[in-house]
Image (tube, rainbow, N blue to C red):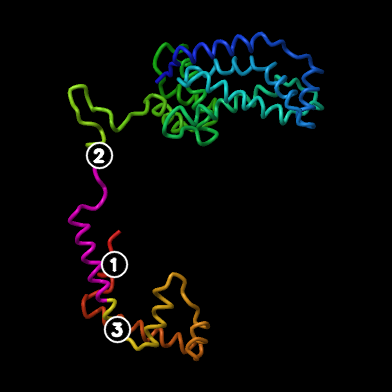
Amino acid sequence: MTHTDDIDTQRANIGYIRTSMTVPLLAREEEFDLARRWREQGDEKALHALVRAYGRLVIAMAGRFRLYGLPSGDLVQEGNVGLMQAAARFDADRDVRFSTYATWWIKAAMQDFVLRNWSIVRTGTTAPQKSLFFNLRRLRAKIEEASGGALDEAGRDKIAETLGVSKADVRTMEQRLSGADQSLNAPISEASEDDAQSFLPDTGPSPEEIVIGLRDAETRSKWLKEALDSLSPRERQIICERRLGDEPVTLEKLGQSLGVSKERVRQLENRALAKLRDQILKHVEQPQDLLIDA
């Protein structure tokens, strides 16, 4: 869906564009001097002068992204962020014009903004996906114009080869770009008041399953308590500290607490586990019957 600004926003945008287009460009030595002053001395006046002089680059780049349906003012703001990043990283000693260097940063900032806001579902998380997202429409239009028909498999092969991606990636991005986000609260038709989410299956447990699960948990807890009561106090302490705590106590530490060797603690633990197993098997035929279904 294409975004349309209100009247006040449109006037503000037009005023900003007109002002930016009237700022004179800088000579090579001027921009080098401003960039050095900002980077080396933190001179904010130099940064403002540099950004104002090349605001027209941001405006021109924002025009190239207008077809993605996002607010032009937001695109310009993101472009200005990229412009300031370029100013912070620009090295005048490399003898490259600031406008050439800044163009890449402006474009990168706007591309990232488009990818983050074009859809609720994140698009273009990998380099091939980003390349497809920003080039598929252009290449498809070019191929369709040359062939006089819709994009076919041969055309997809050509796009995949040109961009260095797989044909499967091309098909996936075609589908992604062909459909807009749909609200689950939107009516399924003009004649119906039902929304899409009303027809989504509930994958959670039913009320009956919840009640059965609670009762089974209570029964298991009762059986475990009975089994623990069958142990001696020392065995119960070992099981509780070794098996039922958030952080199991080491055999050595338990041995020191009980005044026995850690090997003796291991023997007592194994004996207690065997007793617990015998007690539990009085209620179920197989131990795995106690497991809770995921």
Real-space CA distance between mark 2 and mark 3, rounded to the nearest whole angstrom: 48 Å
Label 3, on which residue?
229
Which residues fall within the magenta stretch?
A: 201-223
Q: Secondary structure at mark 2?
A: loop
Q: Main secondary structure of the magenta part?
A: helix
Q: Amino acid at mark 3?
A: Asp
Front in this rendered view, residue 150 or 45:
45
Say which residue appears at 33% left-offset and 29% top-offset. 182
Front in this rendered view, residue 58 or 18:
18
Label 2, on which residue?
200
Q: In screen coordinates, is 39 left or right of 243?
A: right
Q: Amino acid at mark 2?
A: Leu
Q: Earlier in the sequence, mark 2 or mark 1?
A: 2
Q: Secondary structure at mark 3?
A: helix
Question: Which image quadrant for residue 119?
Answer: top left
Front in this rendered view, residue 281 or 59:
59
Q: Amino acid at mark 1?
A: Leu
Say which residue appears at 28% left-offset and 64% top-offset. 292
| Neighbour tally class for label 2: few under 14, some 14-19, many 20 plus, Cα within 10 Å | few
| Neighbour tally class for label 3: few under 14, some 14-19, many 20 plus, Cα within 10 Å | few
Relative height, residue 9 to residue 114 (above, below): above
Where's residue 74, x and y in %?
A: 53, 23
Label 1, on which residue?
291
